[in-house]
Amino acid sequence: MARLAALAHPYGITHTGVAPAAVLTRAREAIHQRLADGLVADMQFTFKHPERSTDPGQAVRGAQSVFVAARPYLLAEPPPPAPAELPGRIARYAWLDHYAPLREGLWAVTRRLRADGWKAVPFADDNSIVDREVAHLAGLGWFGKNANLLLPGAGSWFVLGCVVTTAPLPVAAAPVADGCGTCRRCLDACPTGAILAPGVVDAGQCLAWALQRPGIIPRHLRAAVGDRLYGCDDCQEVCPPSVRFGPRHMPATDQQPAAWLPVLQLLSATDDELLATWGRWYLADRDPRWVRRNALIVLGNTGLGGPATGGAGLGTTGGAVAPATDATPDARVQRVLADYLAHSDPMLRAHAVWAAQQLGLHHLMPATDPHPDVQSELQAVR
């Protein structure tokens, strides 16, 4: 085990452990319960095929153990300040591509196991296995009340991956005991109340999923999006272990982190430009229209030029922006919105209607629209 951990360490992997390759019974029951309770909100991932994602033996026939790795993503250097021109905020894990070095470390372990004659397959950000569950069983951490895995003395700012193998590696003696106690800061800080109970998150109310899932963002969530373009960190930014211990675990990098993105620049970019720059993000069907949709919501919340609430610093939270009623969006904002109100995509037109209404640009909105989604938005703002 120490030899495998040493192979992973050069890739920024700081925590490793081994779980048994048995059926993940607790996770399977939880997945079926969330589905039955209607808390999944069309989320696929490991919810799509629970019997597969909770059985390492279906990933690798004859699997005996699961080598688990955690790589921190809280950066030592602060990101560049938000651009002056209407910034959209990005969740920390997406500032850089942390999964690429994690995969490299997992492949280093995989090659060693294969060279020793064992079957081994690496998984990272993959629907084939519930990575938090195997990480818990491997002794890496406990489940926080926000459903994130919390590592003792380290917090939750980690990406996870694993190698399922037929090698009989020594498994953890026991999972880590709960360390949250009576703390409920994550529940109280969630901007939409999506954390219904300890460890139970309603995906339909979670902003992180609202900004990833396809379709129209529900109207009741749009103001809460605030200046968030991709992801939400609020429940982690108030978590005492993450705040206290997170800065002890920071990967070295020479890359430039992207904590913000100018919204008007994004809305003016081509699809190819968006995919070339941000294609590593999860986008349903690899379609950049979902990022454009998010940007229109951010524009509606911040387009009057007021500062966004919160920021990308550790310990801050974000929320809806309350624009000044006597402000007027500048000419470029109005031009961009006019373009999207006439866009060929009705989903984008619908969100442009909402943004125009938020900014008091009723004169830009059409009287009617042939698509029912856009027509519904027009009726809602009148």
Image (cartoon, rainbow, N blue to C red):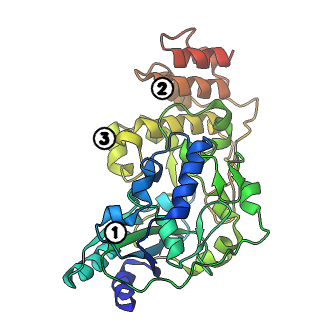
Question: Tag 3: Cα neighbours inside 10 Å, few (<14), some, or many (≥20)?
Answer: few
Q: In the displayed structure, would residue 261 be above or below residue 72?
A: above
State the image coordinates of residue 301 (x, y, percent, origin top left): 64, 37
State the image coordinates of residue 205 (x, y, percent, origin top left): 64, 43
Quarter-wise, where is residue 192 in the image? Answer: top right
Q: Which residue is mark 1?
A: 103
Q: Earlier in the sequence, mark 1 or mark 2?
A: 1
Q: Which residue is mark 3?
A: 272
**Residue placed at 64% from the left, 36% from the top?**
222
Q: Are marks 2 and 3 in contact (CB under 8 Å)?
A: no
Q: Is residue 189 left or right of residue 356?
A: right
**Residue placed at 61% from the left, 45% from the top?**
227
Q: Earlier in the sequence, mark 3 or mark 1?
A: 1
Q: Determine whether the residue tagged by mark 1 lies in a helix, strand or loop.
A: helix
Q: Is residue 316 left or right of residue 269?
A: right
State the image coordinates of residue 158 (x, y, percent, origin top left): 51, 69
Q: Which residue is mark 2?
A: 347
Q: Taking the image as drawn, is residue 229 in sight? A: no
Q: Amino acid at mark 1?
A: Arg
Q: Taking the image as drawn, is residue 172 in sight? A: yes
Q: Determine whether the residue tagged by mark 2 lies in a helix, strand or loop.
A: helix
**Residue placed at 38% from the left, 88% from the top?**
1
Quarter of the figure with the C terminus: top right
Camera-side residue of 192 and 179: 179
Q: In the displayed structure, would residue 157 be above or below residue 263?
A: below
Q: Amino acid at mark 3?
A: Asp
Viewer-side label of 3, 1: 1
